[in-house]
Each structure stands twice: as C-alpha cells, then as structure tokens.
Image: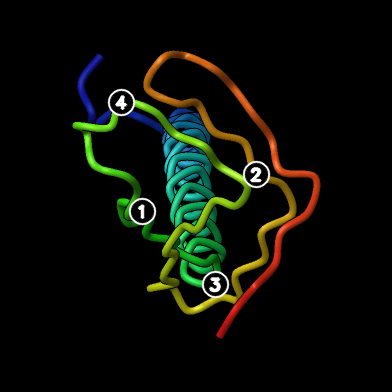
Amino acid sequence: MPWSSWGATEWTALAAAANALLLIVLVLATLFYAGQTKASVDELREARITEALPVLHWQQPSGPSESTGAYYLAQLTVDLTNYGRGAARILAFSAVDDRGGAFTAPAIAVQW
C-alpha cells in the first residue's frame, strides 16, 4: 500500500505506534540516567565519609636491640600520627609480636 493513499486512520495508527516507541525509549533512557545518578551520589557520599575519617600512621616503636634477643615489656610506646581530617579515637588495641604472640591493651593512655 503506497503512502500517498493512506487515510486519516492509517496516519493516526502510525503516529500512535511512533509515540509508543518514543515513550519506551524515553522511559529506558530515564531509568539508565537514574541509575547513573544514584551511582554518582553513592560515590560522592562514600568520598565525603572517607574525607572525615582519621588516617592513622603507625611508626616503628623503638625497642631493645636485636642483639639482646629478649623483650621485657612493662609498657609499650607506639608513635601514632593522624594525617586525616577527622578526630582520631583509639577504642581498642591489639598487636602480634615477631614470634606470633598476641596481646591486647586493657587501657590506652594518650600523651601529647
């Protein structure tokens, strides 16, 4: 059937089909961009939270020389520096020595 012989009914049906197709494309594009926006917002939220967290840098504590071969610890001193923006709070501490022995600190004292 040639295009020139179409009446109002055929053109209306073609317009309705084109509208339906464009509507589907619009809905799919909207869903795609909504997903992209949500991913961006989640990434920005994570970056904002990460910026506010402390970044703690542990330094090697000074101890007895390797030649003595023994540690007798009544007190352990560790140098800790906060390079992050957030406030550093140490709520618990645990460590493992060179021989695999684990220990925890029941209390932590902060010196300035």
> Along the polypeptide, which appears first: circle 1 or circle 2?
1
Q: Nearer the viewer, residue 69 or 37?
A: 69
* 52 over 112 or under it: above or below: above
Q: Seen in the image, is 30 located left or right of residue 69?
A: right
Q: Seen in the image, is 73 located left or right of residue 60?
A: right
Q: Provide the residue designation for mark 2.
A: 93
Q: Provide the residue designation for mark 1.
A: 61
Looking at the image, do the residues carrying marks 2 and 3 touch, with CB atoms under 8 Å apart? no
* 10 over 81 or under it: above or below: above
> Along the polypeptide, which appears first: circle 3 or circle 1?
3
Q: Provide the residue designation for mark 3.
A: 52
Residue at 56% over, 64% down: 49
Q: Amino acid at mark 4?
A: Gly
Q: Amino acid at mark 1?
A: Pro
**Closer mark to the observer between disc 3 and disc 1:** 1
Q: Provide the residue designation for mark 4.
A: 69
Label 2 to label 3: alpha-carbon separation: 21 Å
Extreme residue in the bottom direction? 112
Q: Nearer the viewer, residue 25 or 79?
A: 79
**Closer mark to the observer between disc 2 and disc 3:** 2
Q: Amino acid at mark 3?
A: Ala
Q: Position of residue 8 (x, y in %)?
A: 48, 39
> Along the polypeptide, which appears first: circle 4 or circle 1?
1
Label 4 to label 3: alpha-carbon separation: 42 Å
Residue 38 badge: none
